[in-house]
């Protein structure tokens, strides 16, 4: 028996959340007195996995699996789980991992808990703490099936080094009929820029910006901070910004280290999606805006004056700390 | 084309969340229940298929009798028939097993579920269903076109989107983007009257064991006071973020 972790990568590099999942798997393995096996696809950076406690790597090298395909990957992971007799499978909360997790839970008749924020409360029975009610609460979920899938919330558990020497084993899953019934036609993706899903810092703006023509300073602020840009729902409904930037309960969840909300009132549906961020800053000219109740730091002021000053101060700060 | 829209009955997005019975149950008192927003986008897309492509649209929910107002609302919006599996939705696995049975018996070509329910945030029902039924599956779906037996969908991915092609029978996990906000419909009087005549079939659950159990709930720790920085002293914010919060 070992703990299996699915380590997602892109263009031969592991995602940070994959290493976080590995760190989490190590803790579970430690508690259960066993070791961690990772399954990775077309990635040869195996030493990195060892750093985060992975004992053995099942390395899949298959051109058909160059890009993510939920069903084919789920088949591979489920076969790896059987081969390793894994009772616990750990994965991240990326969009792809969540897509695969449901399929995997169905294939293995497994228990699945998504958005897990802490190491298991107990291992027998296995109980994990996860967010529920769109971050308005936590649930302690008991996993009763023979196999359990733990989806670790991004940026909650953190990276923990536990260096071991990882042995590498080639693994060739047997892909079944229909594995590629859903075919990728075209991927349209920003490369080389932080995304809302994995950015450490997110700069988000709302209807207080008055119009799409005023986003220049939001983008500049994000650039200075190496942050991803995001927006409130009405901003995307109005077409000021793409839908993919909409965050909140019905949009993308944000779990960054720093979330800066500019001209966003702080409606309950918005806060639900961003409250998992560690430090929140609000800039709003209305001191009564509900966001001030949810934020750690705030500036009451006109965004059109405050944001340029903030950019200037950050540039000075960066110059001093370079 | 025969479409099934899976509807989860959830607390209105503005609800305050509380727990009772020693923090083991979600407190439903004073809570207004609605169609899960992700399912409302899916239902609205289904209405488009009905009006433009002559599809038949059924809706299904796994829930006790108290969920009927929500399912009636879906009928008032325009679904043709409803199915209620008469059981409390114990967990995602249990619900998926029930819905899989409905899909098998109803011979649906397209099953539209949501990316996740906004209450328990499982995000697993459509995926588990797809595995149990061995149907094609596209999650976080933000656009869907069907032409005969072929489907083209767009799914949201981290940092962008991916266009995929597949065939029916298909299950999607839908979300905002499937239709525009402005396409959402509020049921009118005529719709509400007509909904009363429509079939709402109550079926017993099949035997299924839940895979998980919520043993206890917790509320987030109360938030401390916000620290205000003067608008004329923005540099102080940079200081605080660096030295105190240690995030830059
Ligand atoms: C079912 C449902 C789901 C929803 N899901 C989401 C969701 O996922 N995400 C989401 O964001 N919303 C969601 N909403 C919408 C939500 O209720 C709010 O309407 C929305 O978040 C408000 O966006 P906003 O703060 O940008 O705009 P407003 O509420 O219009 O706020 C604008 C703010 O800007 C401030 N402002 C104006 N001028 C300036 C200035 N010059 N400088 C600084 N500040 C200024 C104002 O004081 C105000 O606080 C949902 C609503 C429903 C009903
Ligand atoms: N009790 C239920 N009855 C019908 N459909 C459901 C139910 N619970 C979940 N679903 C469907 O599955 C989707 C994902 O839900 P979940 O996995 O619970 O987050 C929802 O958007 C619904 O389409």
Image (tube, rainbow, N blue to C red):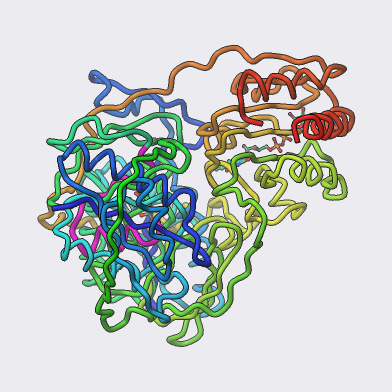
Residue A259 relative to residue A146: left or right: right
**Front residue (pair A114, B99):** A114
Q: Which residues are magenta?
A: A97-116
Can you give x and y, in whole percent of width and height, for residue A280 in the image? 62, 28
Residue A155 relative to residue B215: left or right: right
Q: Residue at x 69, y 40 (%)?
A: A204
Can you give x and y, in whole percent of width and height, for residue A4 in the image? 25, 54
In magenta segment, residue B226: no
In magenta segment, residue A111: yes
Q: Residue at x 24, y 71 (%)?
A: B133
Q: Residue at x 40, y 36 (%)?
A: A157
Write down which quadrant ligand 1 falls in.
Answer: top right
User: Is residue B95 something that shows in the picture?
Assistant: no
Can you give x and y, in whole percent of width and height, for residue A130 in the image? 35, 36
Quarter of the image for residue B248 reads top right
**Front residue (pair A234, A90):** A90
Please, which residue is most extreme toward the front here? A165
* Relative vertical location of residue A198 with respect to residue B14 in this rendering, above or below: below
Please, which residue is most extreme toward the left here? B207
Q: Quadrant of the C terminus of chain A?
A: top right
Can you give x and y, in whole percent of width and height, for residue A119 in the image? 30, 34
**Front residue (pair B65, A136):** A136
**Front residue (pair B50, B153):** B153
Q: Residue at x 32, y 58 (%)?
A: A102
Residue B46 relative to residue A280: left or right: left
Quarter of the image for residue A103 reads bottom left
* Relative vertical location of residue A123 with respect to residue A166 in this rendering, above or below: above
Please, which residue is most extreme toward the bottom here? B148
The secondary structure making up most of the magenta span is: helix
């Amino acid at each position: 028996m070992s703990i299996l972790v699915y380590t997602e990568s892109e263009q031969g590099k592991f995602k940070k959340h994959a290493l976080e999942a590995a760190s989490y798997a190590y803790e579970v393995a430690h508690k259960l007195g066993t070791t961690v096996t990772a399954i990775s696809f077309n990635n040869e950076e195996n030493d990195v996995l060892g750093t985060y406690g992975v004992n053995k790597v099942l390395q899949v090298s298959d051109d058909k699996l160059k890009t993510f395909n939920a069903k084919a990957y789920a088949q591979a992971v489920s076969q790896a789980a059987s081969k390793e007799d894994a009772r616990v499978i750990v994965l991240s909360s990326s969009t792809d991992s969540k897509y695969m997790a449901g399929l995997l839970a169905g294939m293995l008749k497994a228990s699945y808990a998504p958005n897990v924020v802490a190491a298991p409360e107990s291992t027998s029975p296995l109980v994990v703490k996860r967010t529920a009610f769109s971050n308005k609460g936590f649930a302690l979920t008991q996993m009763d099936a023979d196999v359990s899938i733990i989806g670790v919330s991004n940026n909650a558990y953190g990276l923990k080094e536990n260096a071991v020497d990882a042995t590498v084993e080639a693994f060739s899953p047997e892909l079944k009929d229909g594995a590629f019934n859903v075919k990728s036609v075209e991927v349209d993706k920003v490369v080389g820029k932080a995304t809302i899903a994995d950015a450490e810092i997110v700069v988000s703006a709302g209807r207080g910006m008055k119009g799409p023509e005023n986003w220049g300073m939001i983008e500049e602020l994000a650039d200075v901070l190496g942050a991803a840009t995001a927006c409130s729902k009405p901003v995307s409904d109005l077409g000021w910004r793409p839908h993919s930037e909409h965050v909140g309960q019905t949009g993308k969840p944000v779990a960054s280290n720093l979330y800066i909300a500019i001209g966003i009132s702080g409606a309950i549906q918005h806060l639900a999606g961003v409250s998992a961020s560690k430090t929140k800053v609000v800039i709003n000219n209305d001191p009564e805006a509900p966001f001030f109740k949810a934020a750690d730091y705030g500036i009451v002021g006109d965004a059109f004056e405050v944001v340029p000053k903030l950019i200037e101060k950050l540039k000075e700060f960066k110059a001093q700390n370079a | 084309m025969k479409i099934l829209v899976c509807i989860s009955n959830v607390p209105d997005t503005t609800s305050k969340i509380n727990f009772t019975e020693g923090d083991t149950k979600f407190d439903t008192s004073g809570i207004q229940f609605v169609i899960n927003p992700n399912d409302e986008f899916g239902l609205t897309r289904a209405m488009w298929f009905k009006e433009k492509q002559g599809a038949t649209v059924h809706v299904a929910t796994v829930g006790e009798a108290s969920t009927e107002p929500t399912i009636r609302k879906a009928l008032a919006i325009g679904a043709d028939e409803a199915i209620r599996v008469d059981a409390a939705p114990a967990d995602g696995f249990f619900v998926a097993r029930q819905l899989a049975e409905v899909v098998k018996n109803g011979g649906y070509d397209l099953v539209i579920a949501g990316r996740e329910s906004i209450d328990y945030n499982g995000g697993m029902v459509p995926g588990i269903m797809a595995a149990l039924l061995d149907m094609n599956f596209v999650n976080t779906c933000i656009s869907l076109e069907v032409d005969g037996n072929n489907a083209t969908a767009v799914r949201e991915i981290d940092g962008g989107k991916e266009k995929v092609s597949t065939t029916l029978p298909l299950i999607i996990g839908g979300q905002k983007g499937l239709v525009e906000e402005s396409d959402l419909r509020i049921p009118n009087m005529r719709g509400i009257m007509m909904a009363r005549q429509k079939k709402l079939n109550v079926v017993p659950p099949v035997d299924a064991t839940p895979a998980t159990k919520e043993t206890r709930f917790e509320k987030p720790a109360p938030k401390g006071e916000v620290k205000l920085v003067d608008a004329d002293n923005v540099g102080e914010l940079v200081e605080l973020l660096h030295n105190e919060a240690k995030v830059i």
